[in-house]
Amino acid sequence: MSLPDPRIRPVYVWSDIYRGSTYGPKHPLAIPRVSSCTDLIRALGWLDPKFCVEAPMATIEQLARFHDRDYLAALQQAELTQEVSAEVRARHRIGAEGNPVYREIFSRPATSAGGTMLAARLLAQGGVVHCPGGGTHHGRKDRASGFCYLNDPVLAMLQWLDLGLERIVYLDLDAHHGDGVQDAFADEGRVLTISIHEAGRWPGTGLATDRAGGAARNLPVPPGFNDSELRYLLRETVLPMIHAFRPQAIFLQTGADSLEEDPLARLSLSNNAYWEAVRAVRRLAPRLLVVGGGGYNPYTVARCWAGIWASLNDVAIPDHLPREAETVLRGLVYNRAAGRNPPPHWFTTLRDSPREGSVRAEIAVLADLFRDEVFA
């Protein structure tokens, strides 16, 4: 089977492994995300089968490009037995710190990694790929971290480096600092990592002064961070920085937990801000790989990521959803308080009301820290 060319039009990478897969009923990732996004895009008629590819499960050899083999073996064993020893828990943080043992503990993250690495290969000659199942940016070489068992962004960008690319930008919009990616490339001058995240939020890293050996730029923002403030940072700092770096490829992580309705952060973006950022970044490199990441409200995640796909395809977003798309959203289950009485627009529209506001002094100061960056 021949693979689609993302230079002709954007390619969508997905997998049904996410459908029904859950970290457990009380975990923030008990919710459906990739399956809901995909179903919503299909219901809107935006998914051409010729440009839709199912993610393969990555092999151990592929994963070992970054991850330790002992750790990979421990994940496989945990999936097989559905338990871990105290030694494995302590060494690899499997079954600890929000990283539960669950049914697809190896196969699901290995599929996320396989999809993102496939996307990187598809982009060898250029184009755009959207892989919402990717974005597990906390994963470490030898341990789970922050709900992430593997680090698919690192694995994909290593593939780009292996293909000979020499200037790669990683831009992270997740509410949580992309610590695993930053640390993996701390000594790699060919990769510039830029993370916009909530200040003081777990994992507590990503201070503005942390440049990780010169390869990172961190923009920690205060609670209430709004659409106007993201637009300001993009215009004044992030986009000029990317332009100055002259990337051959951009990896964009669009964790949806920076949306106002997300339960695990205190930022106040609307999905309009994500879509605007995607359109702006798309113009800055011949290769663009867009993944998901965080996001713990199924209604807002599905609507945001579906709108990202529309933005990548220059598709107009309707004011009101057709019945088939509304049915997808009405079929979601969200056991937090907000899910018991969802507002009507979570069912009937994709687009949030814009969340504009003043640009606070701390945002302007943050932008000034990174203004006029120069790269060799």
Image (cartoon, rainbow, N blue to C red):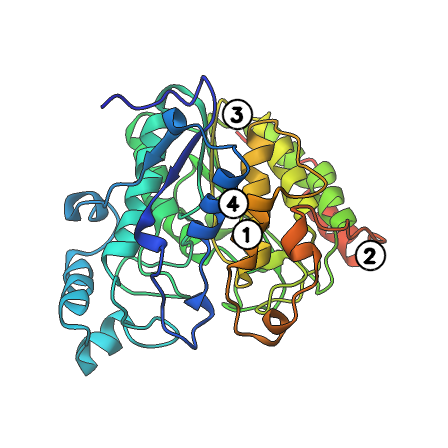
* Cβ atoms at labels 3 and 1 below 8 Å apart: no
Task: Determine which of the numbered discs, if any, sits on residue 360 in the image.
Answer: 2
Instruction: From the image, tell me which residue sits under label 4.
Output: 40
User: Is 63 situated left or right of 240 in this image?
Assistant: left
What secondary structure is marked by label 3?
loop
Query: Which comes sooner in the sequence, label 3 or label 1?
Result: 3
Give the residue at x 35% y 60%.
Answer: 20
Residue type indicated by callout 1: Thr
User: Is 3 situated left or right of 68 in this image?
Assistant: right
Residue type indicated by callout 2: Arg
Residue type indicated by callout 4: Leu
Mark 1 neighbour class, 10 Å CA radius: few under 14, some 14 to 19, many 20 or more: some
Task: Determine which of the numbered discs, if any, sits on residue 327 in the image.
Answer: 1
Mark 2 neighbour class, 10 Å CA radius: few under 14, some 14 to 19, many 20 or more: few
Give the residue at x 43% y 66%.
Answer: 29
What secondary structure is marked by label 1?
helix
Distance between the alpha carbons at the discs numbered 1 and 4 = 9 Å
Mark 3 neighbour class, 10 Å CA radius: few under 14, some 14 to 19, many 20 or more: many
Instruction: From the image, tell me which residue sits under label 3.
Output: 285
Q: Nearer the viewer, residue 62 or 206?
A: 62
Distance between the alpha carbons at the discs numbered 2 and 3 = 30 Å
What secondary structure is marked by label 2?
loop
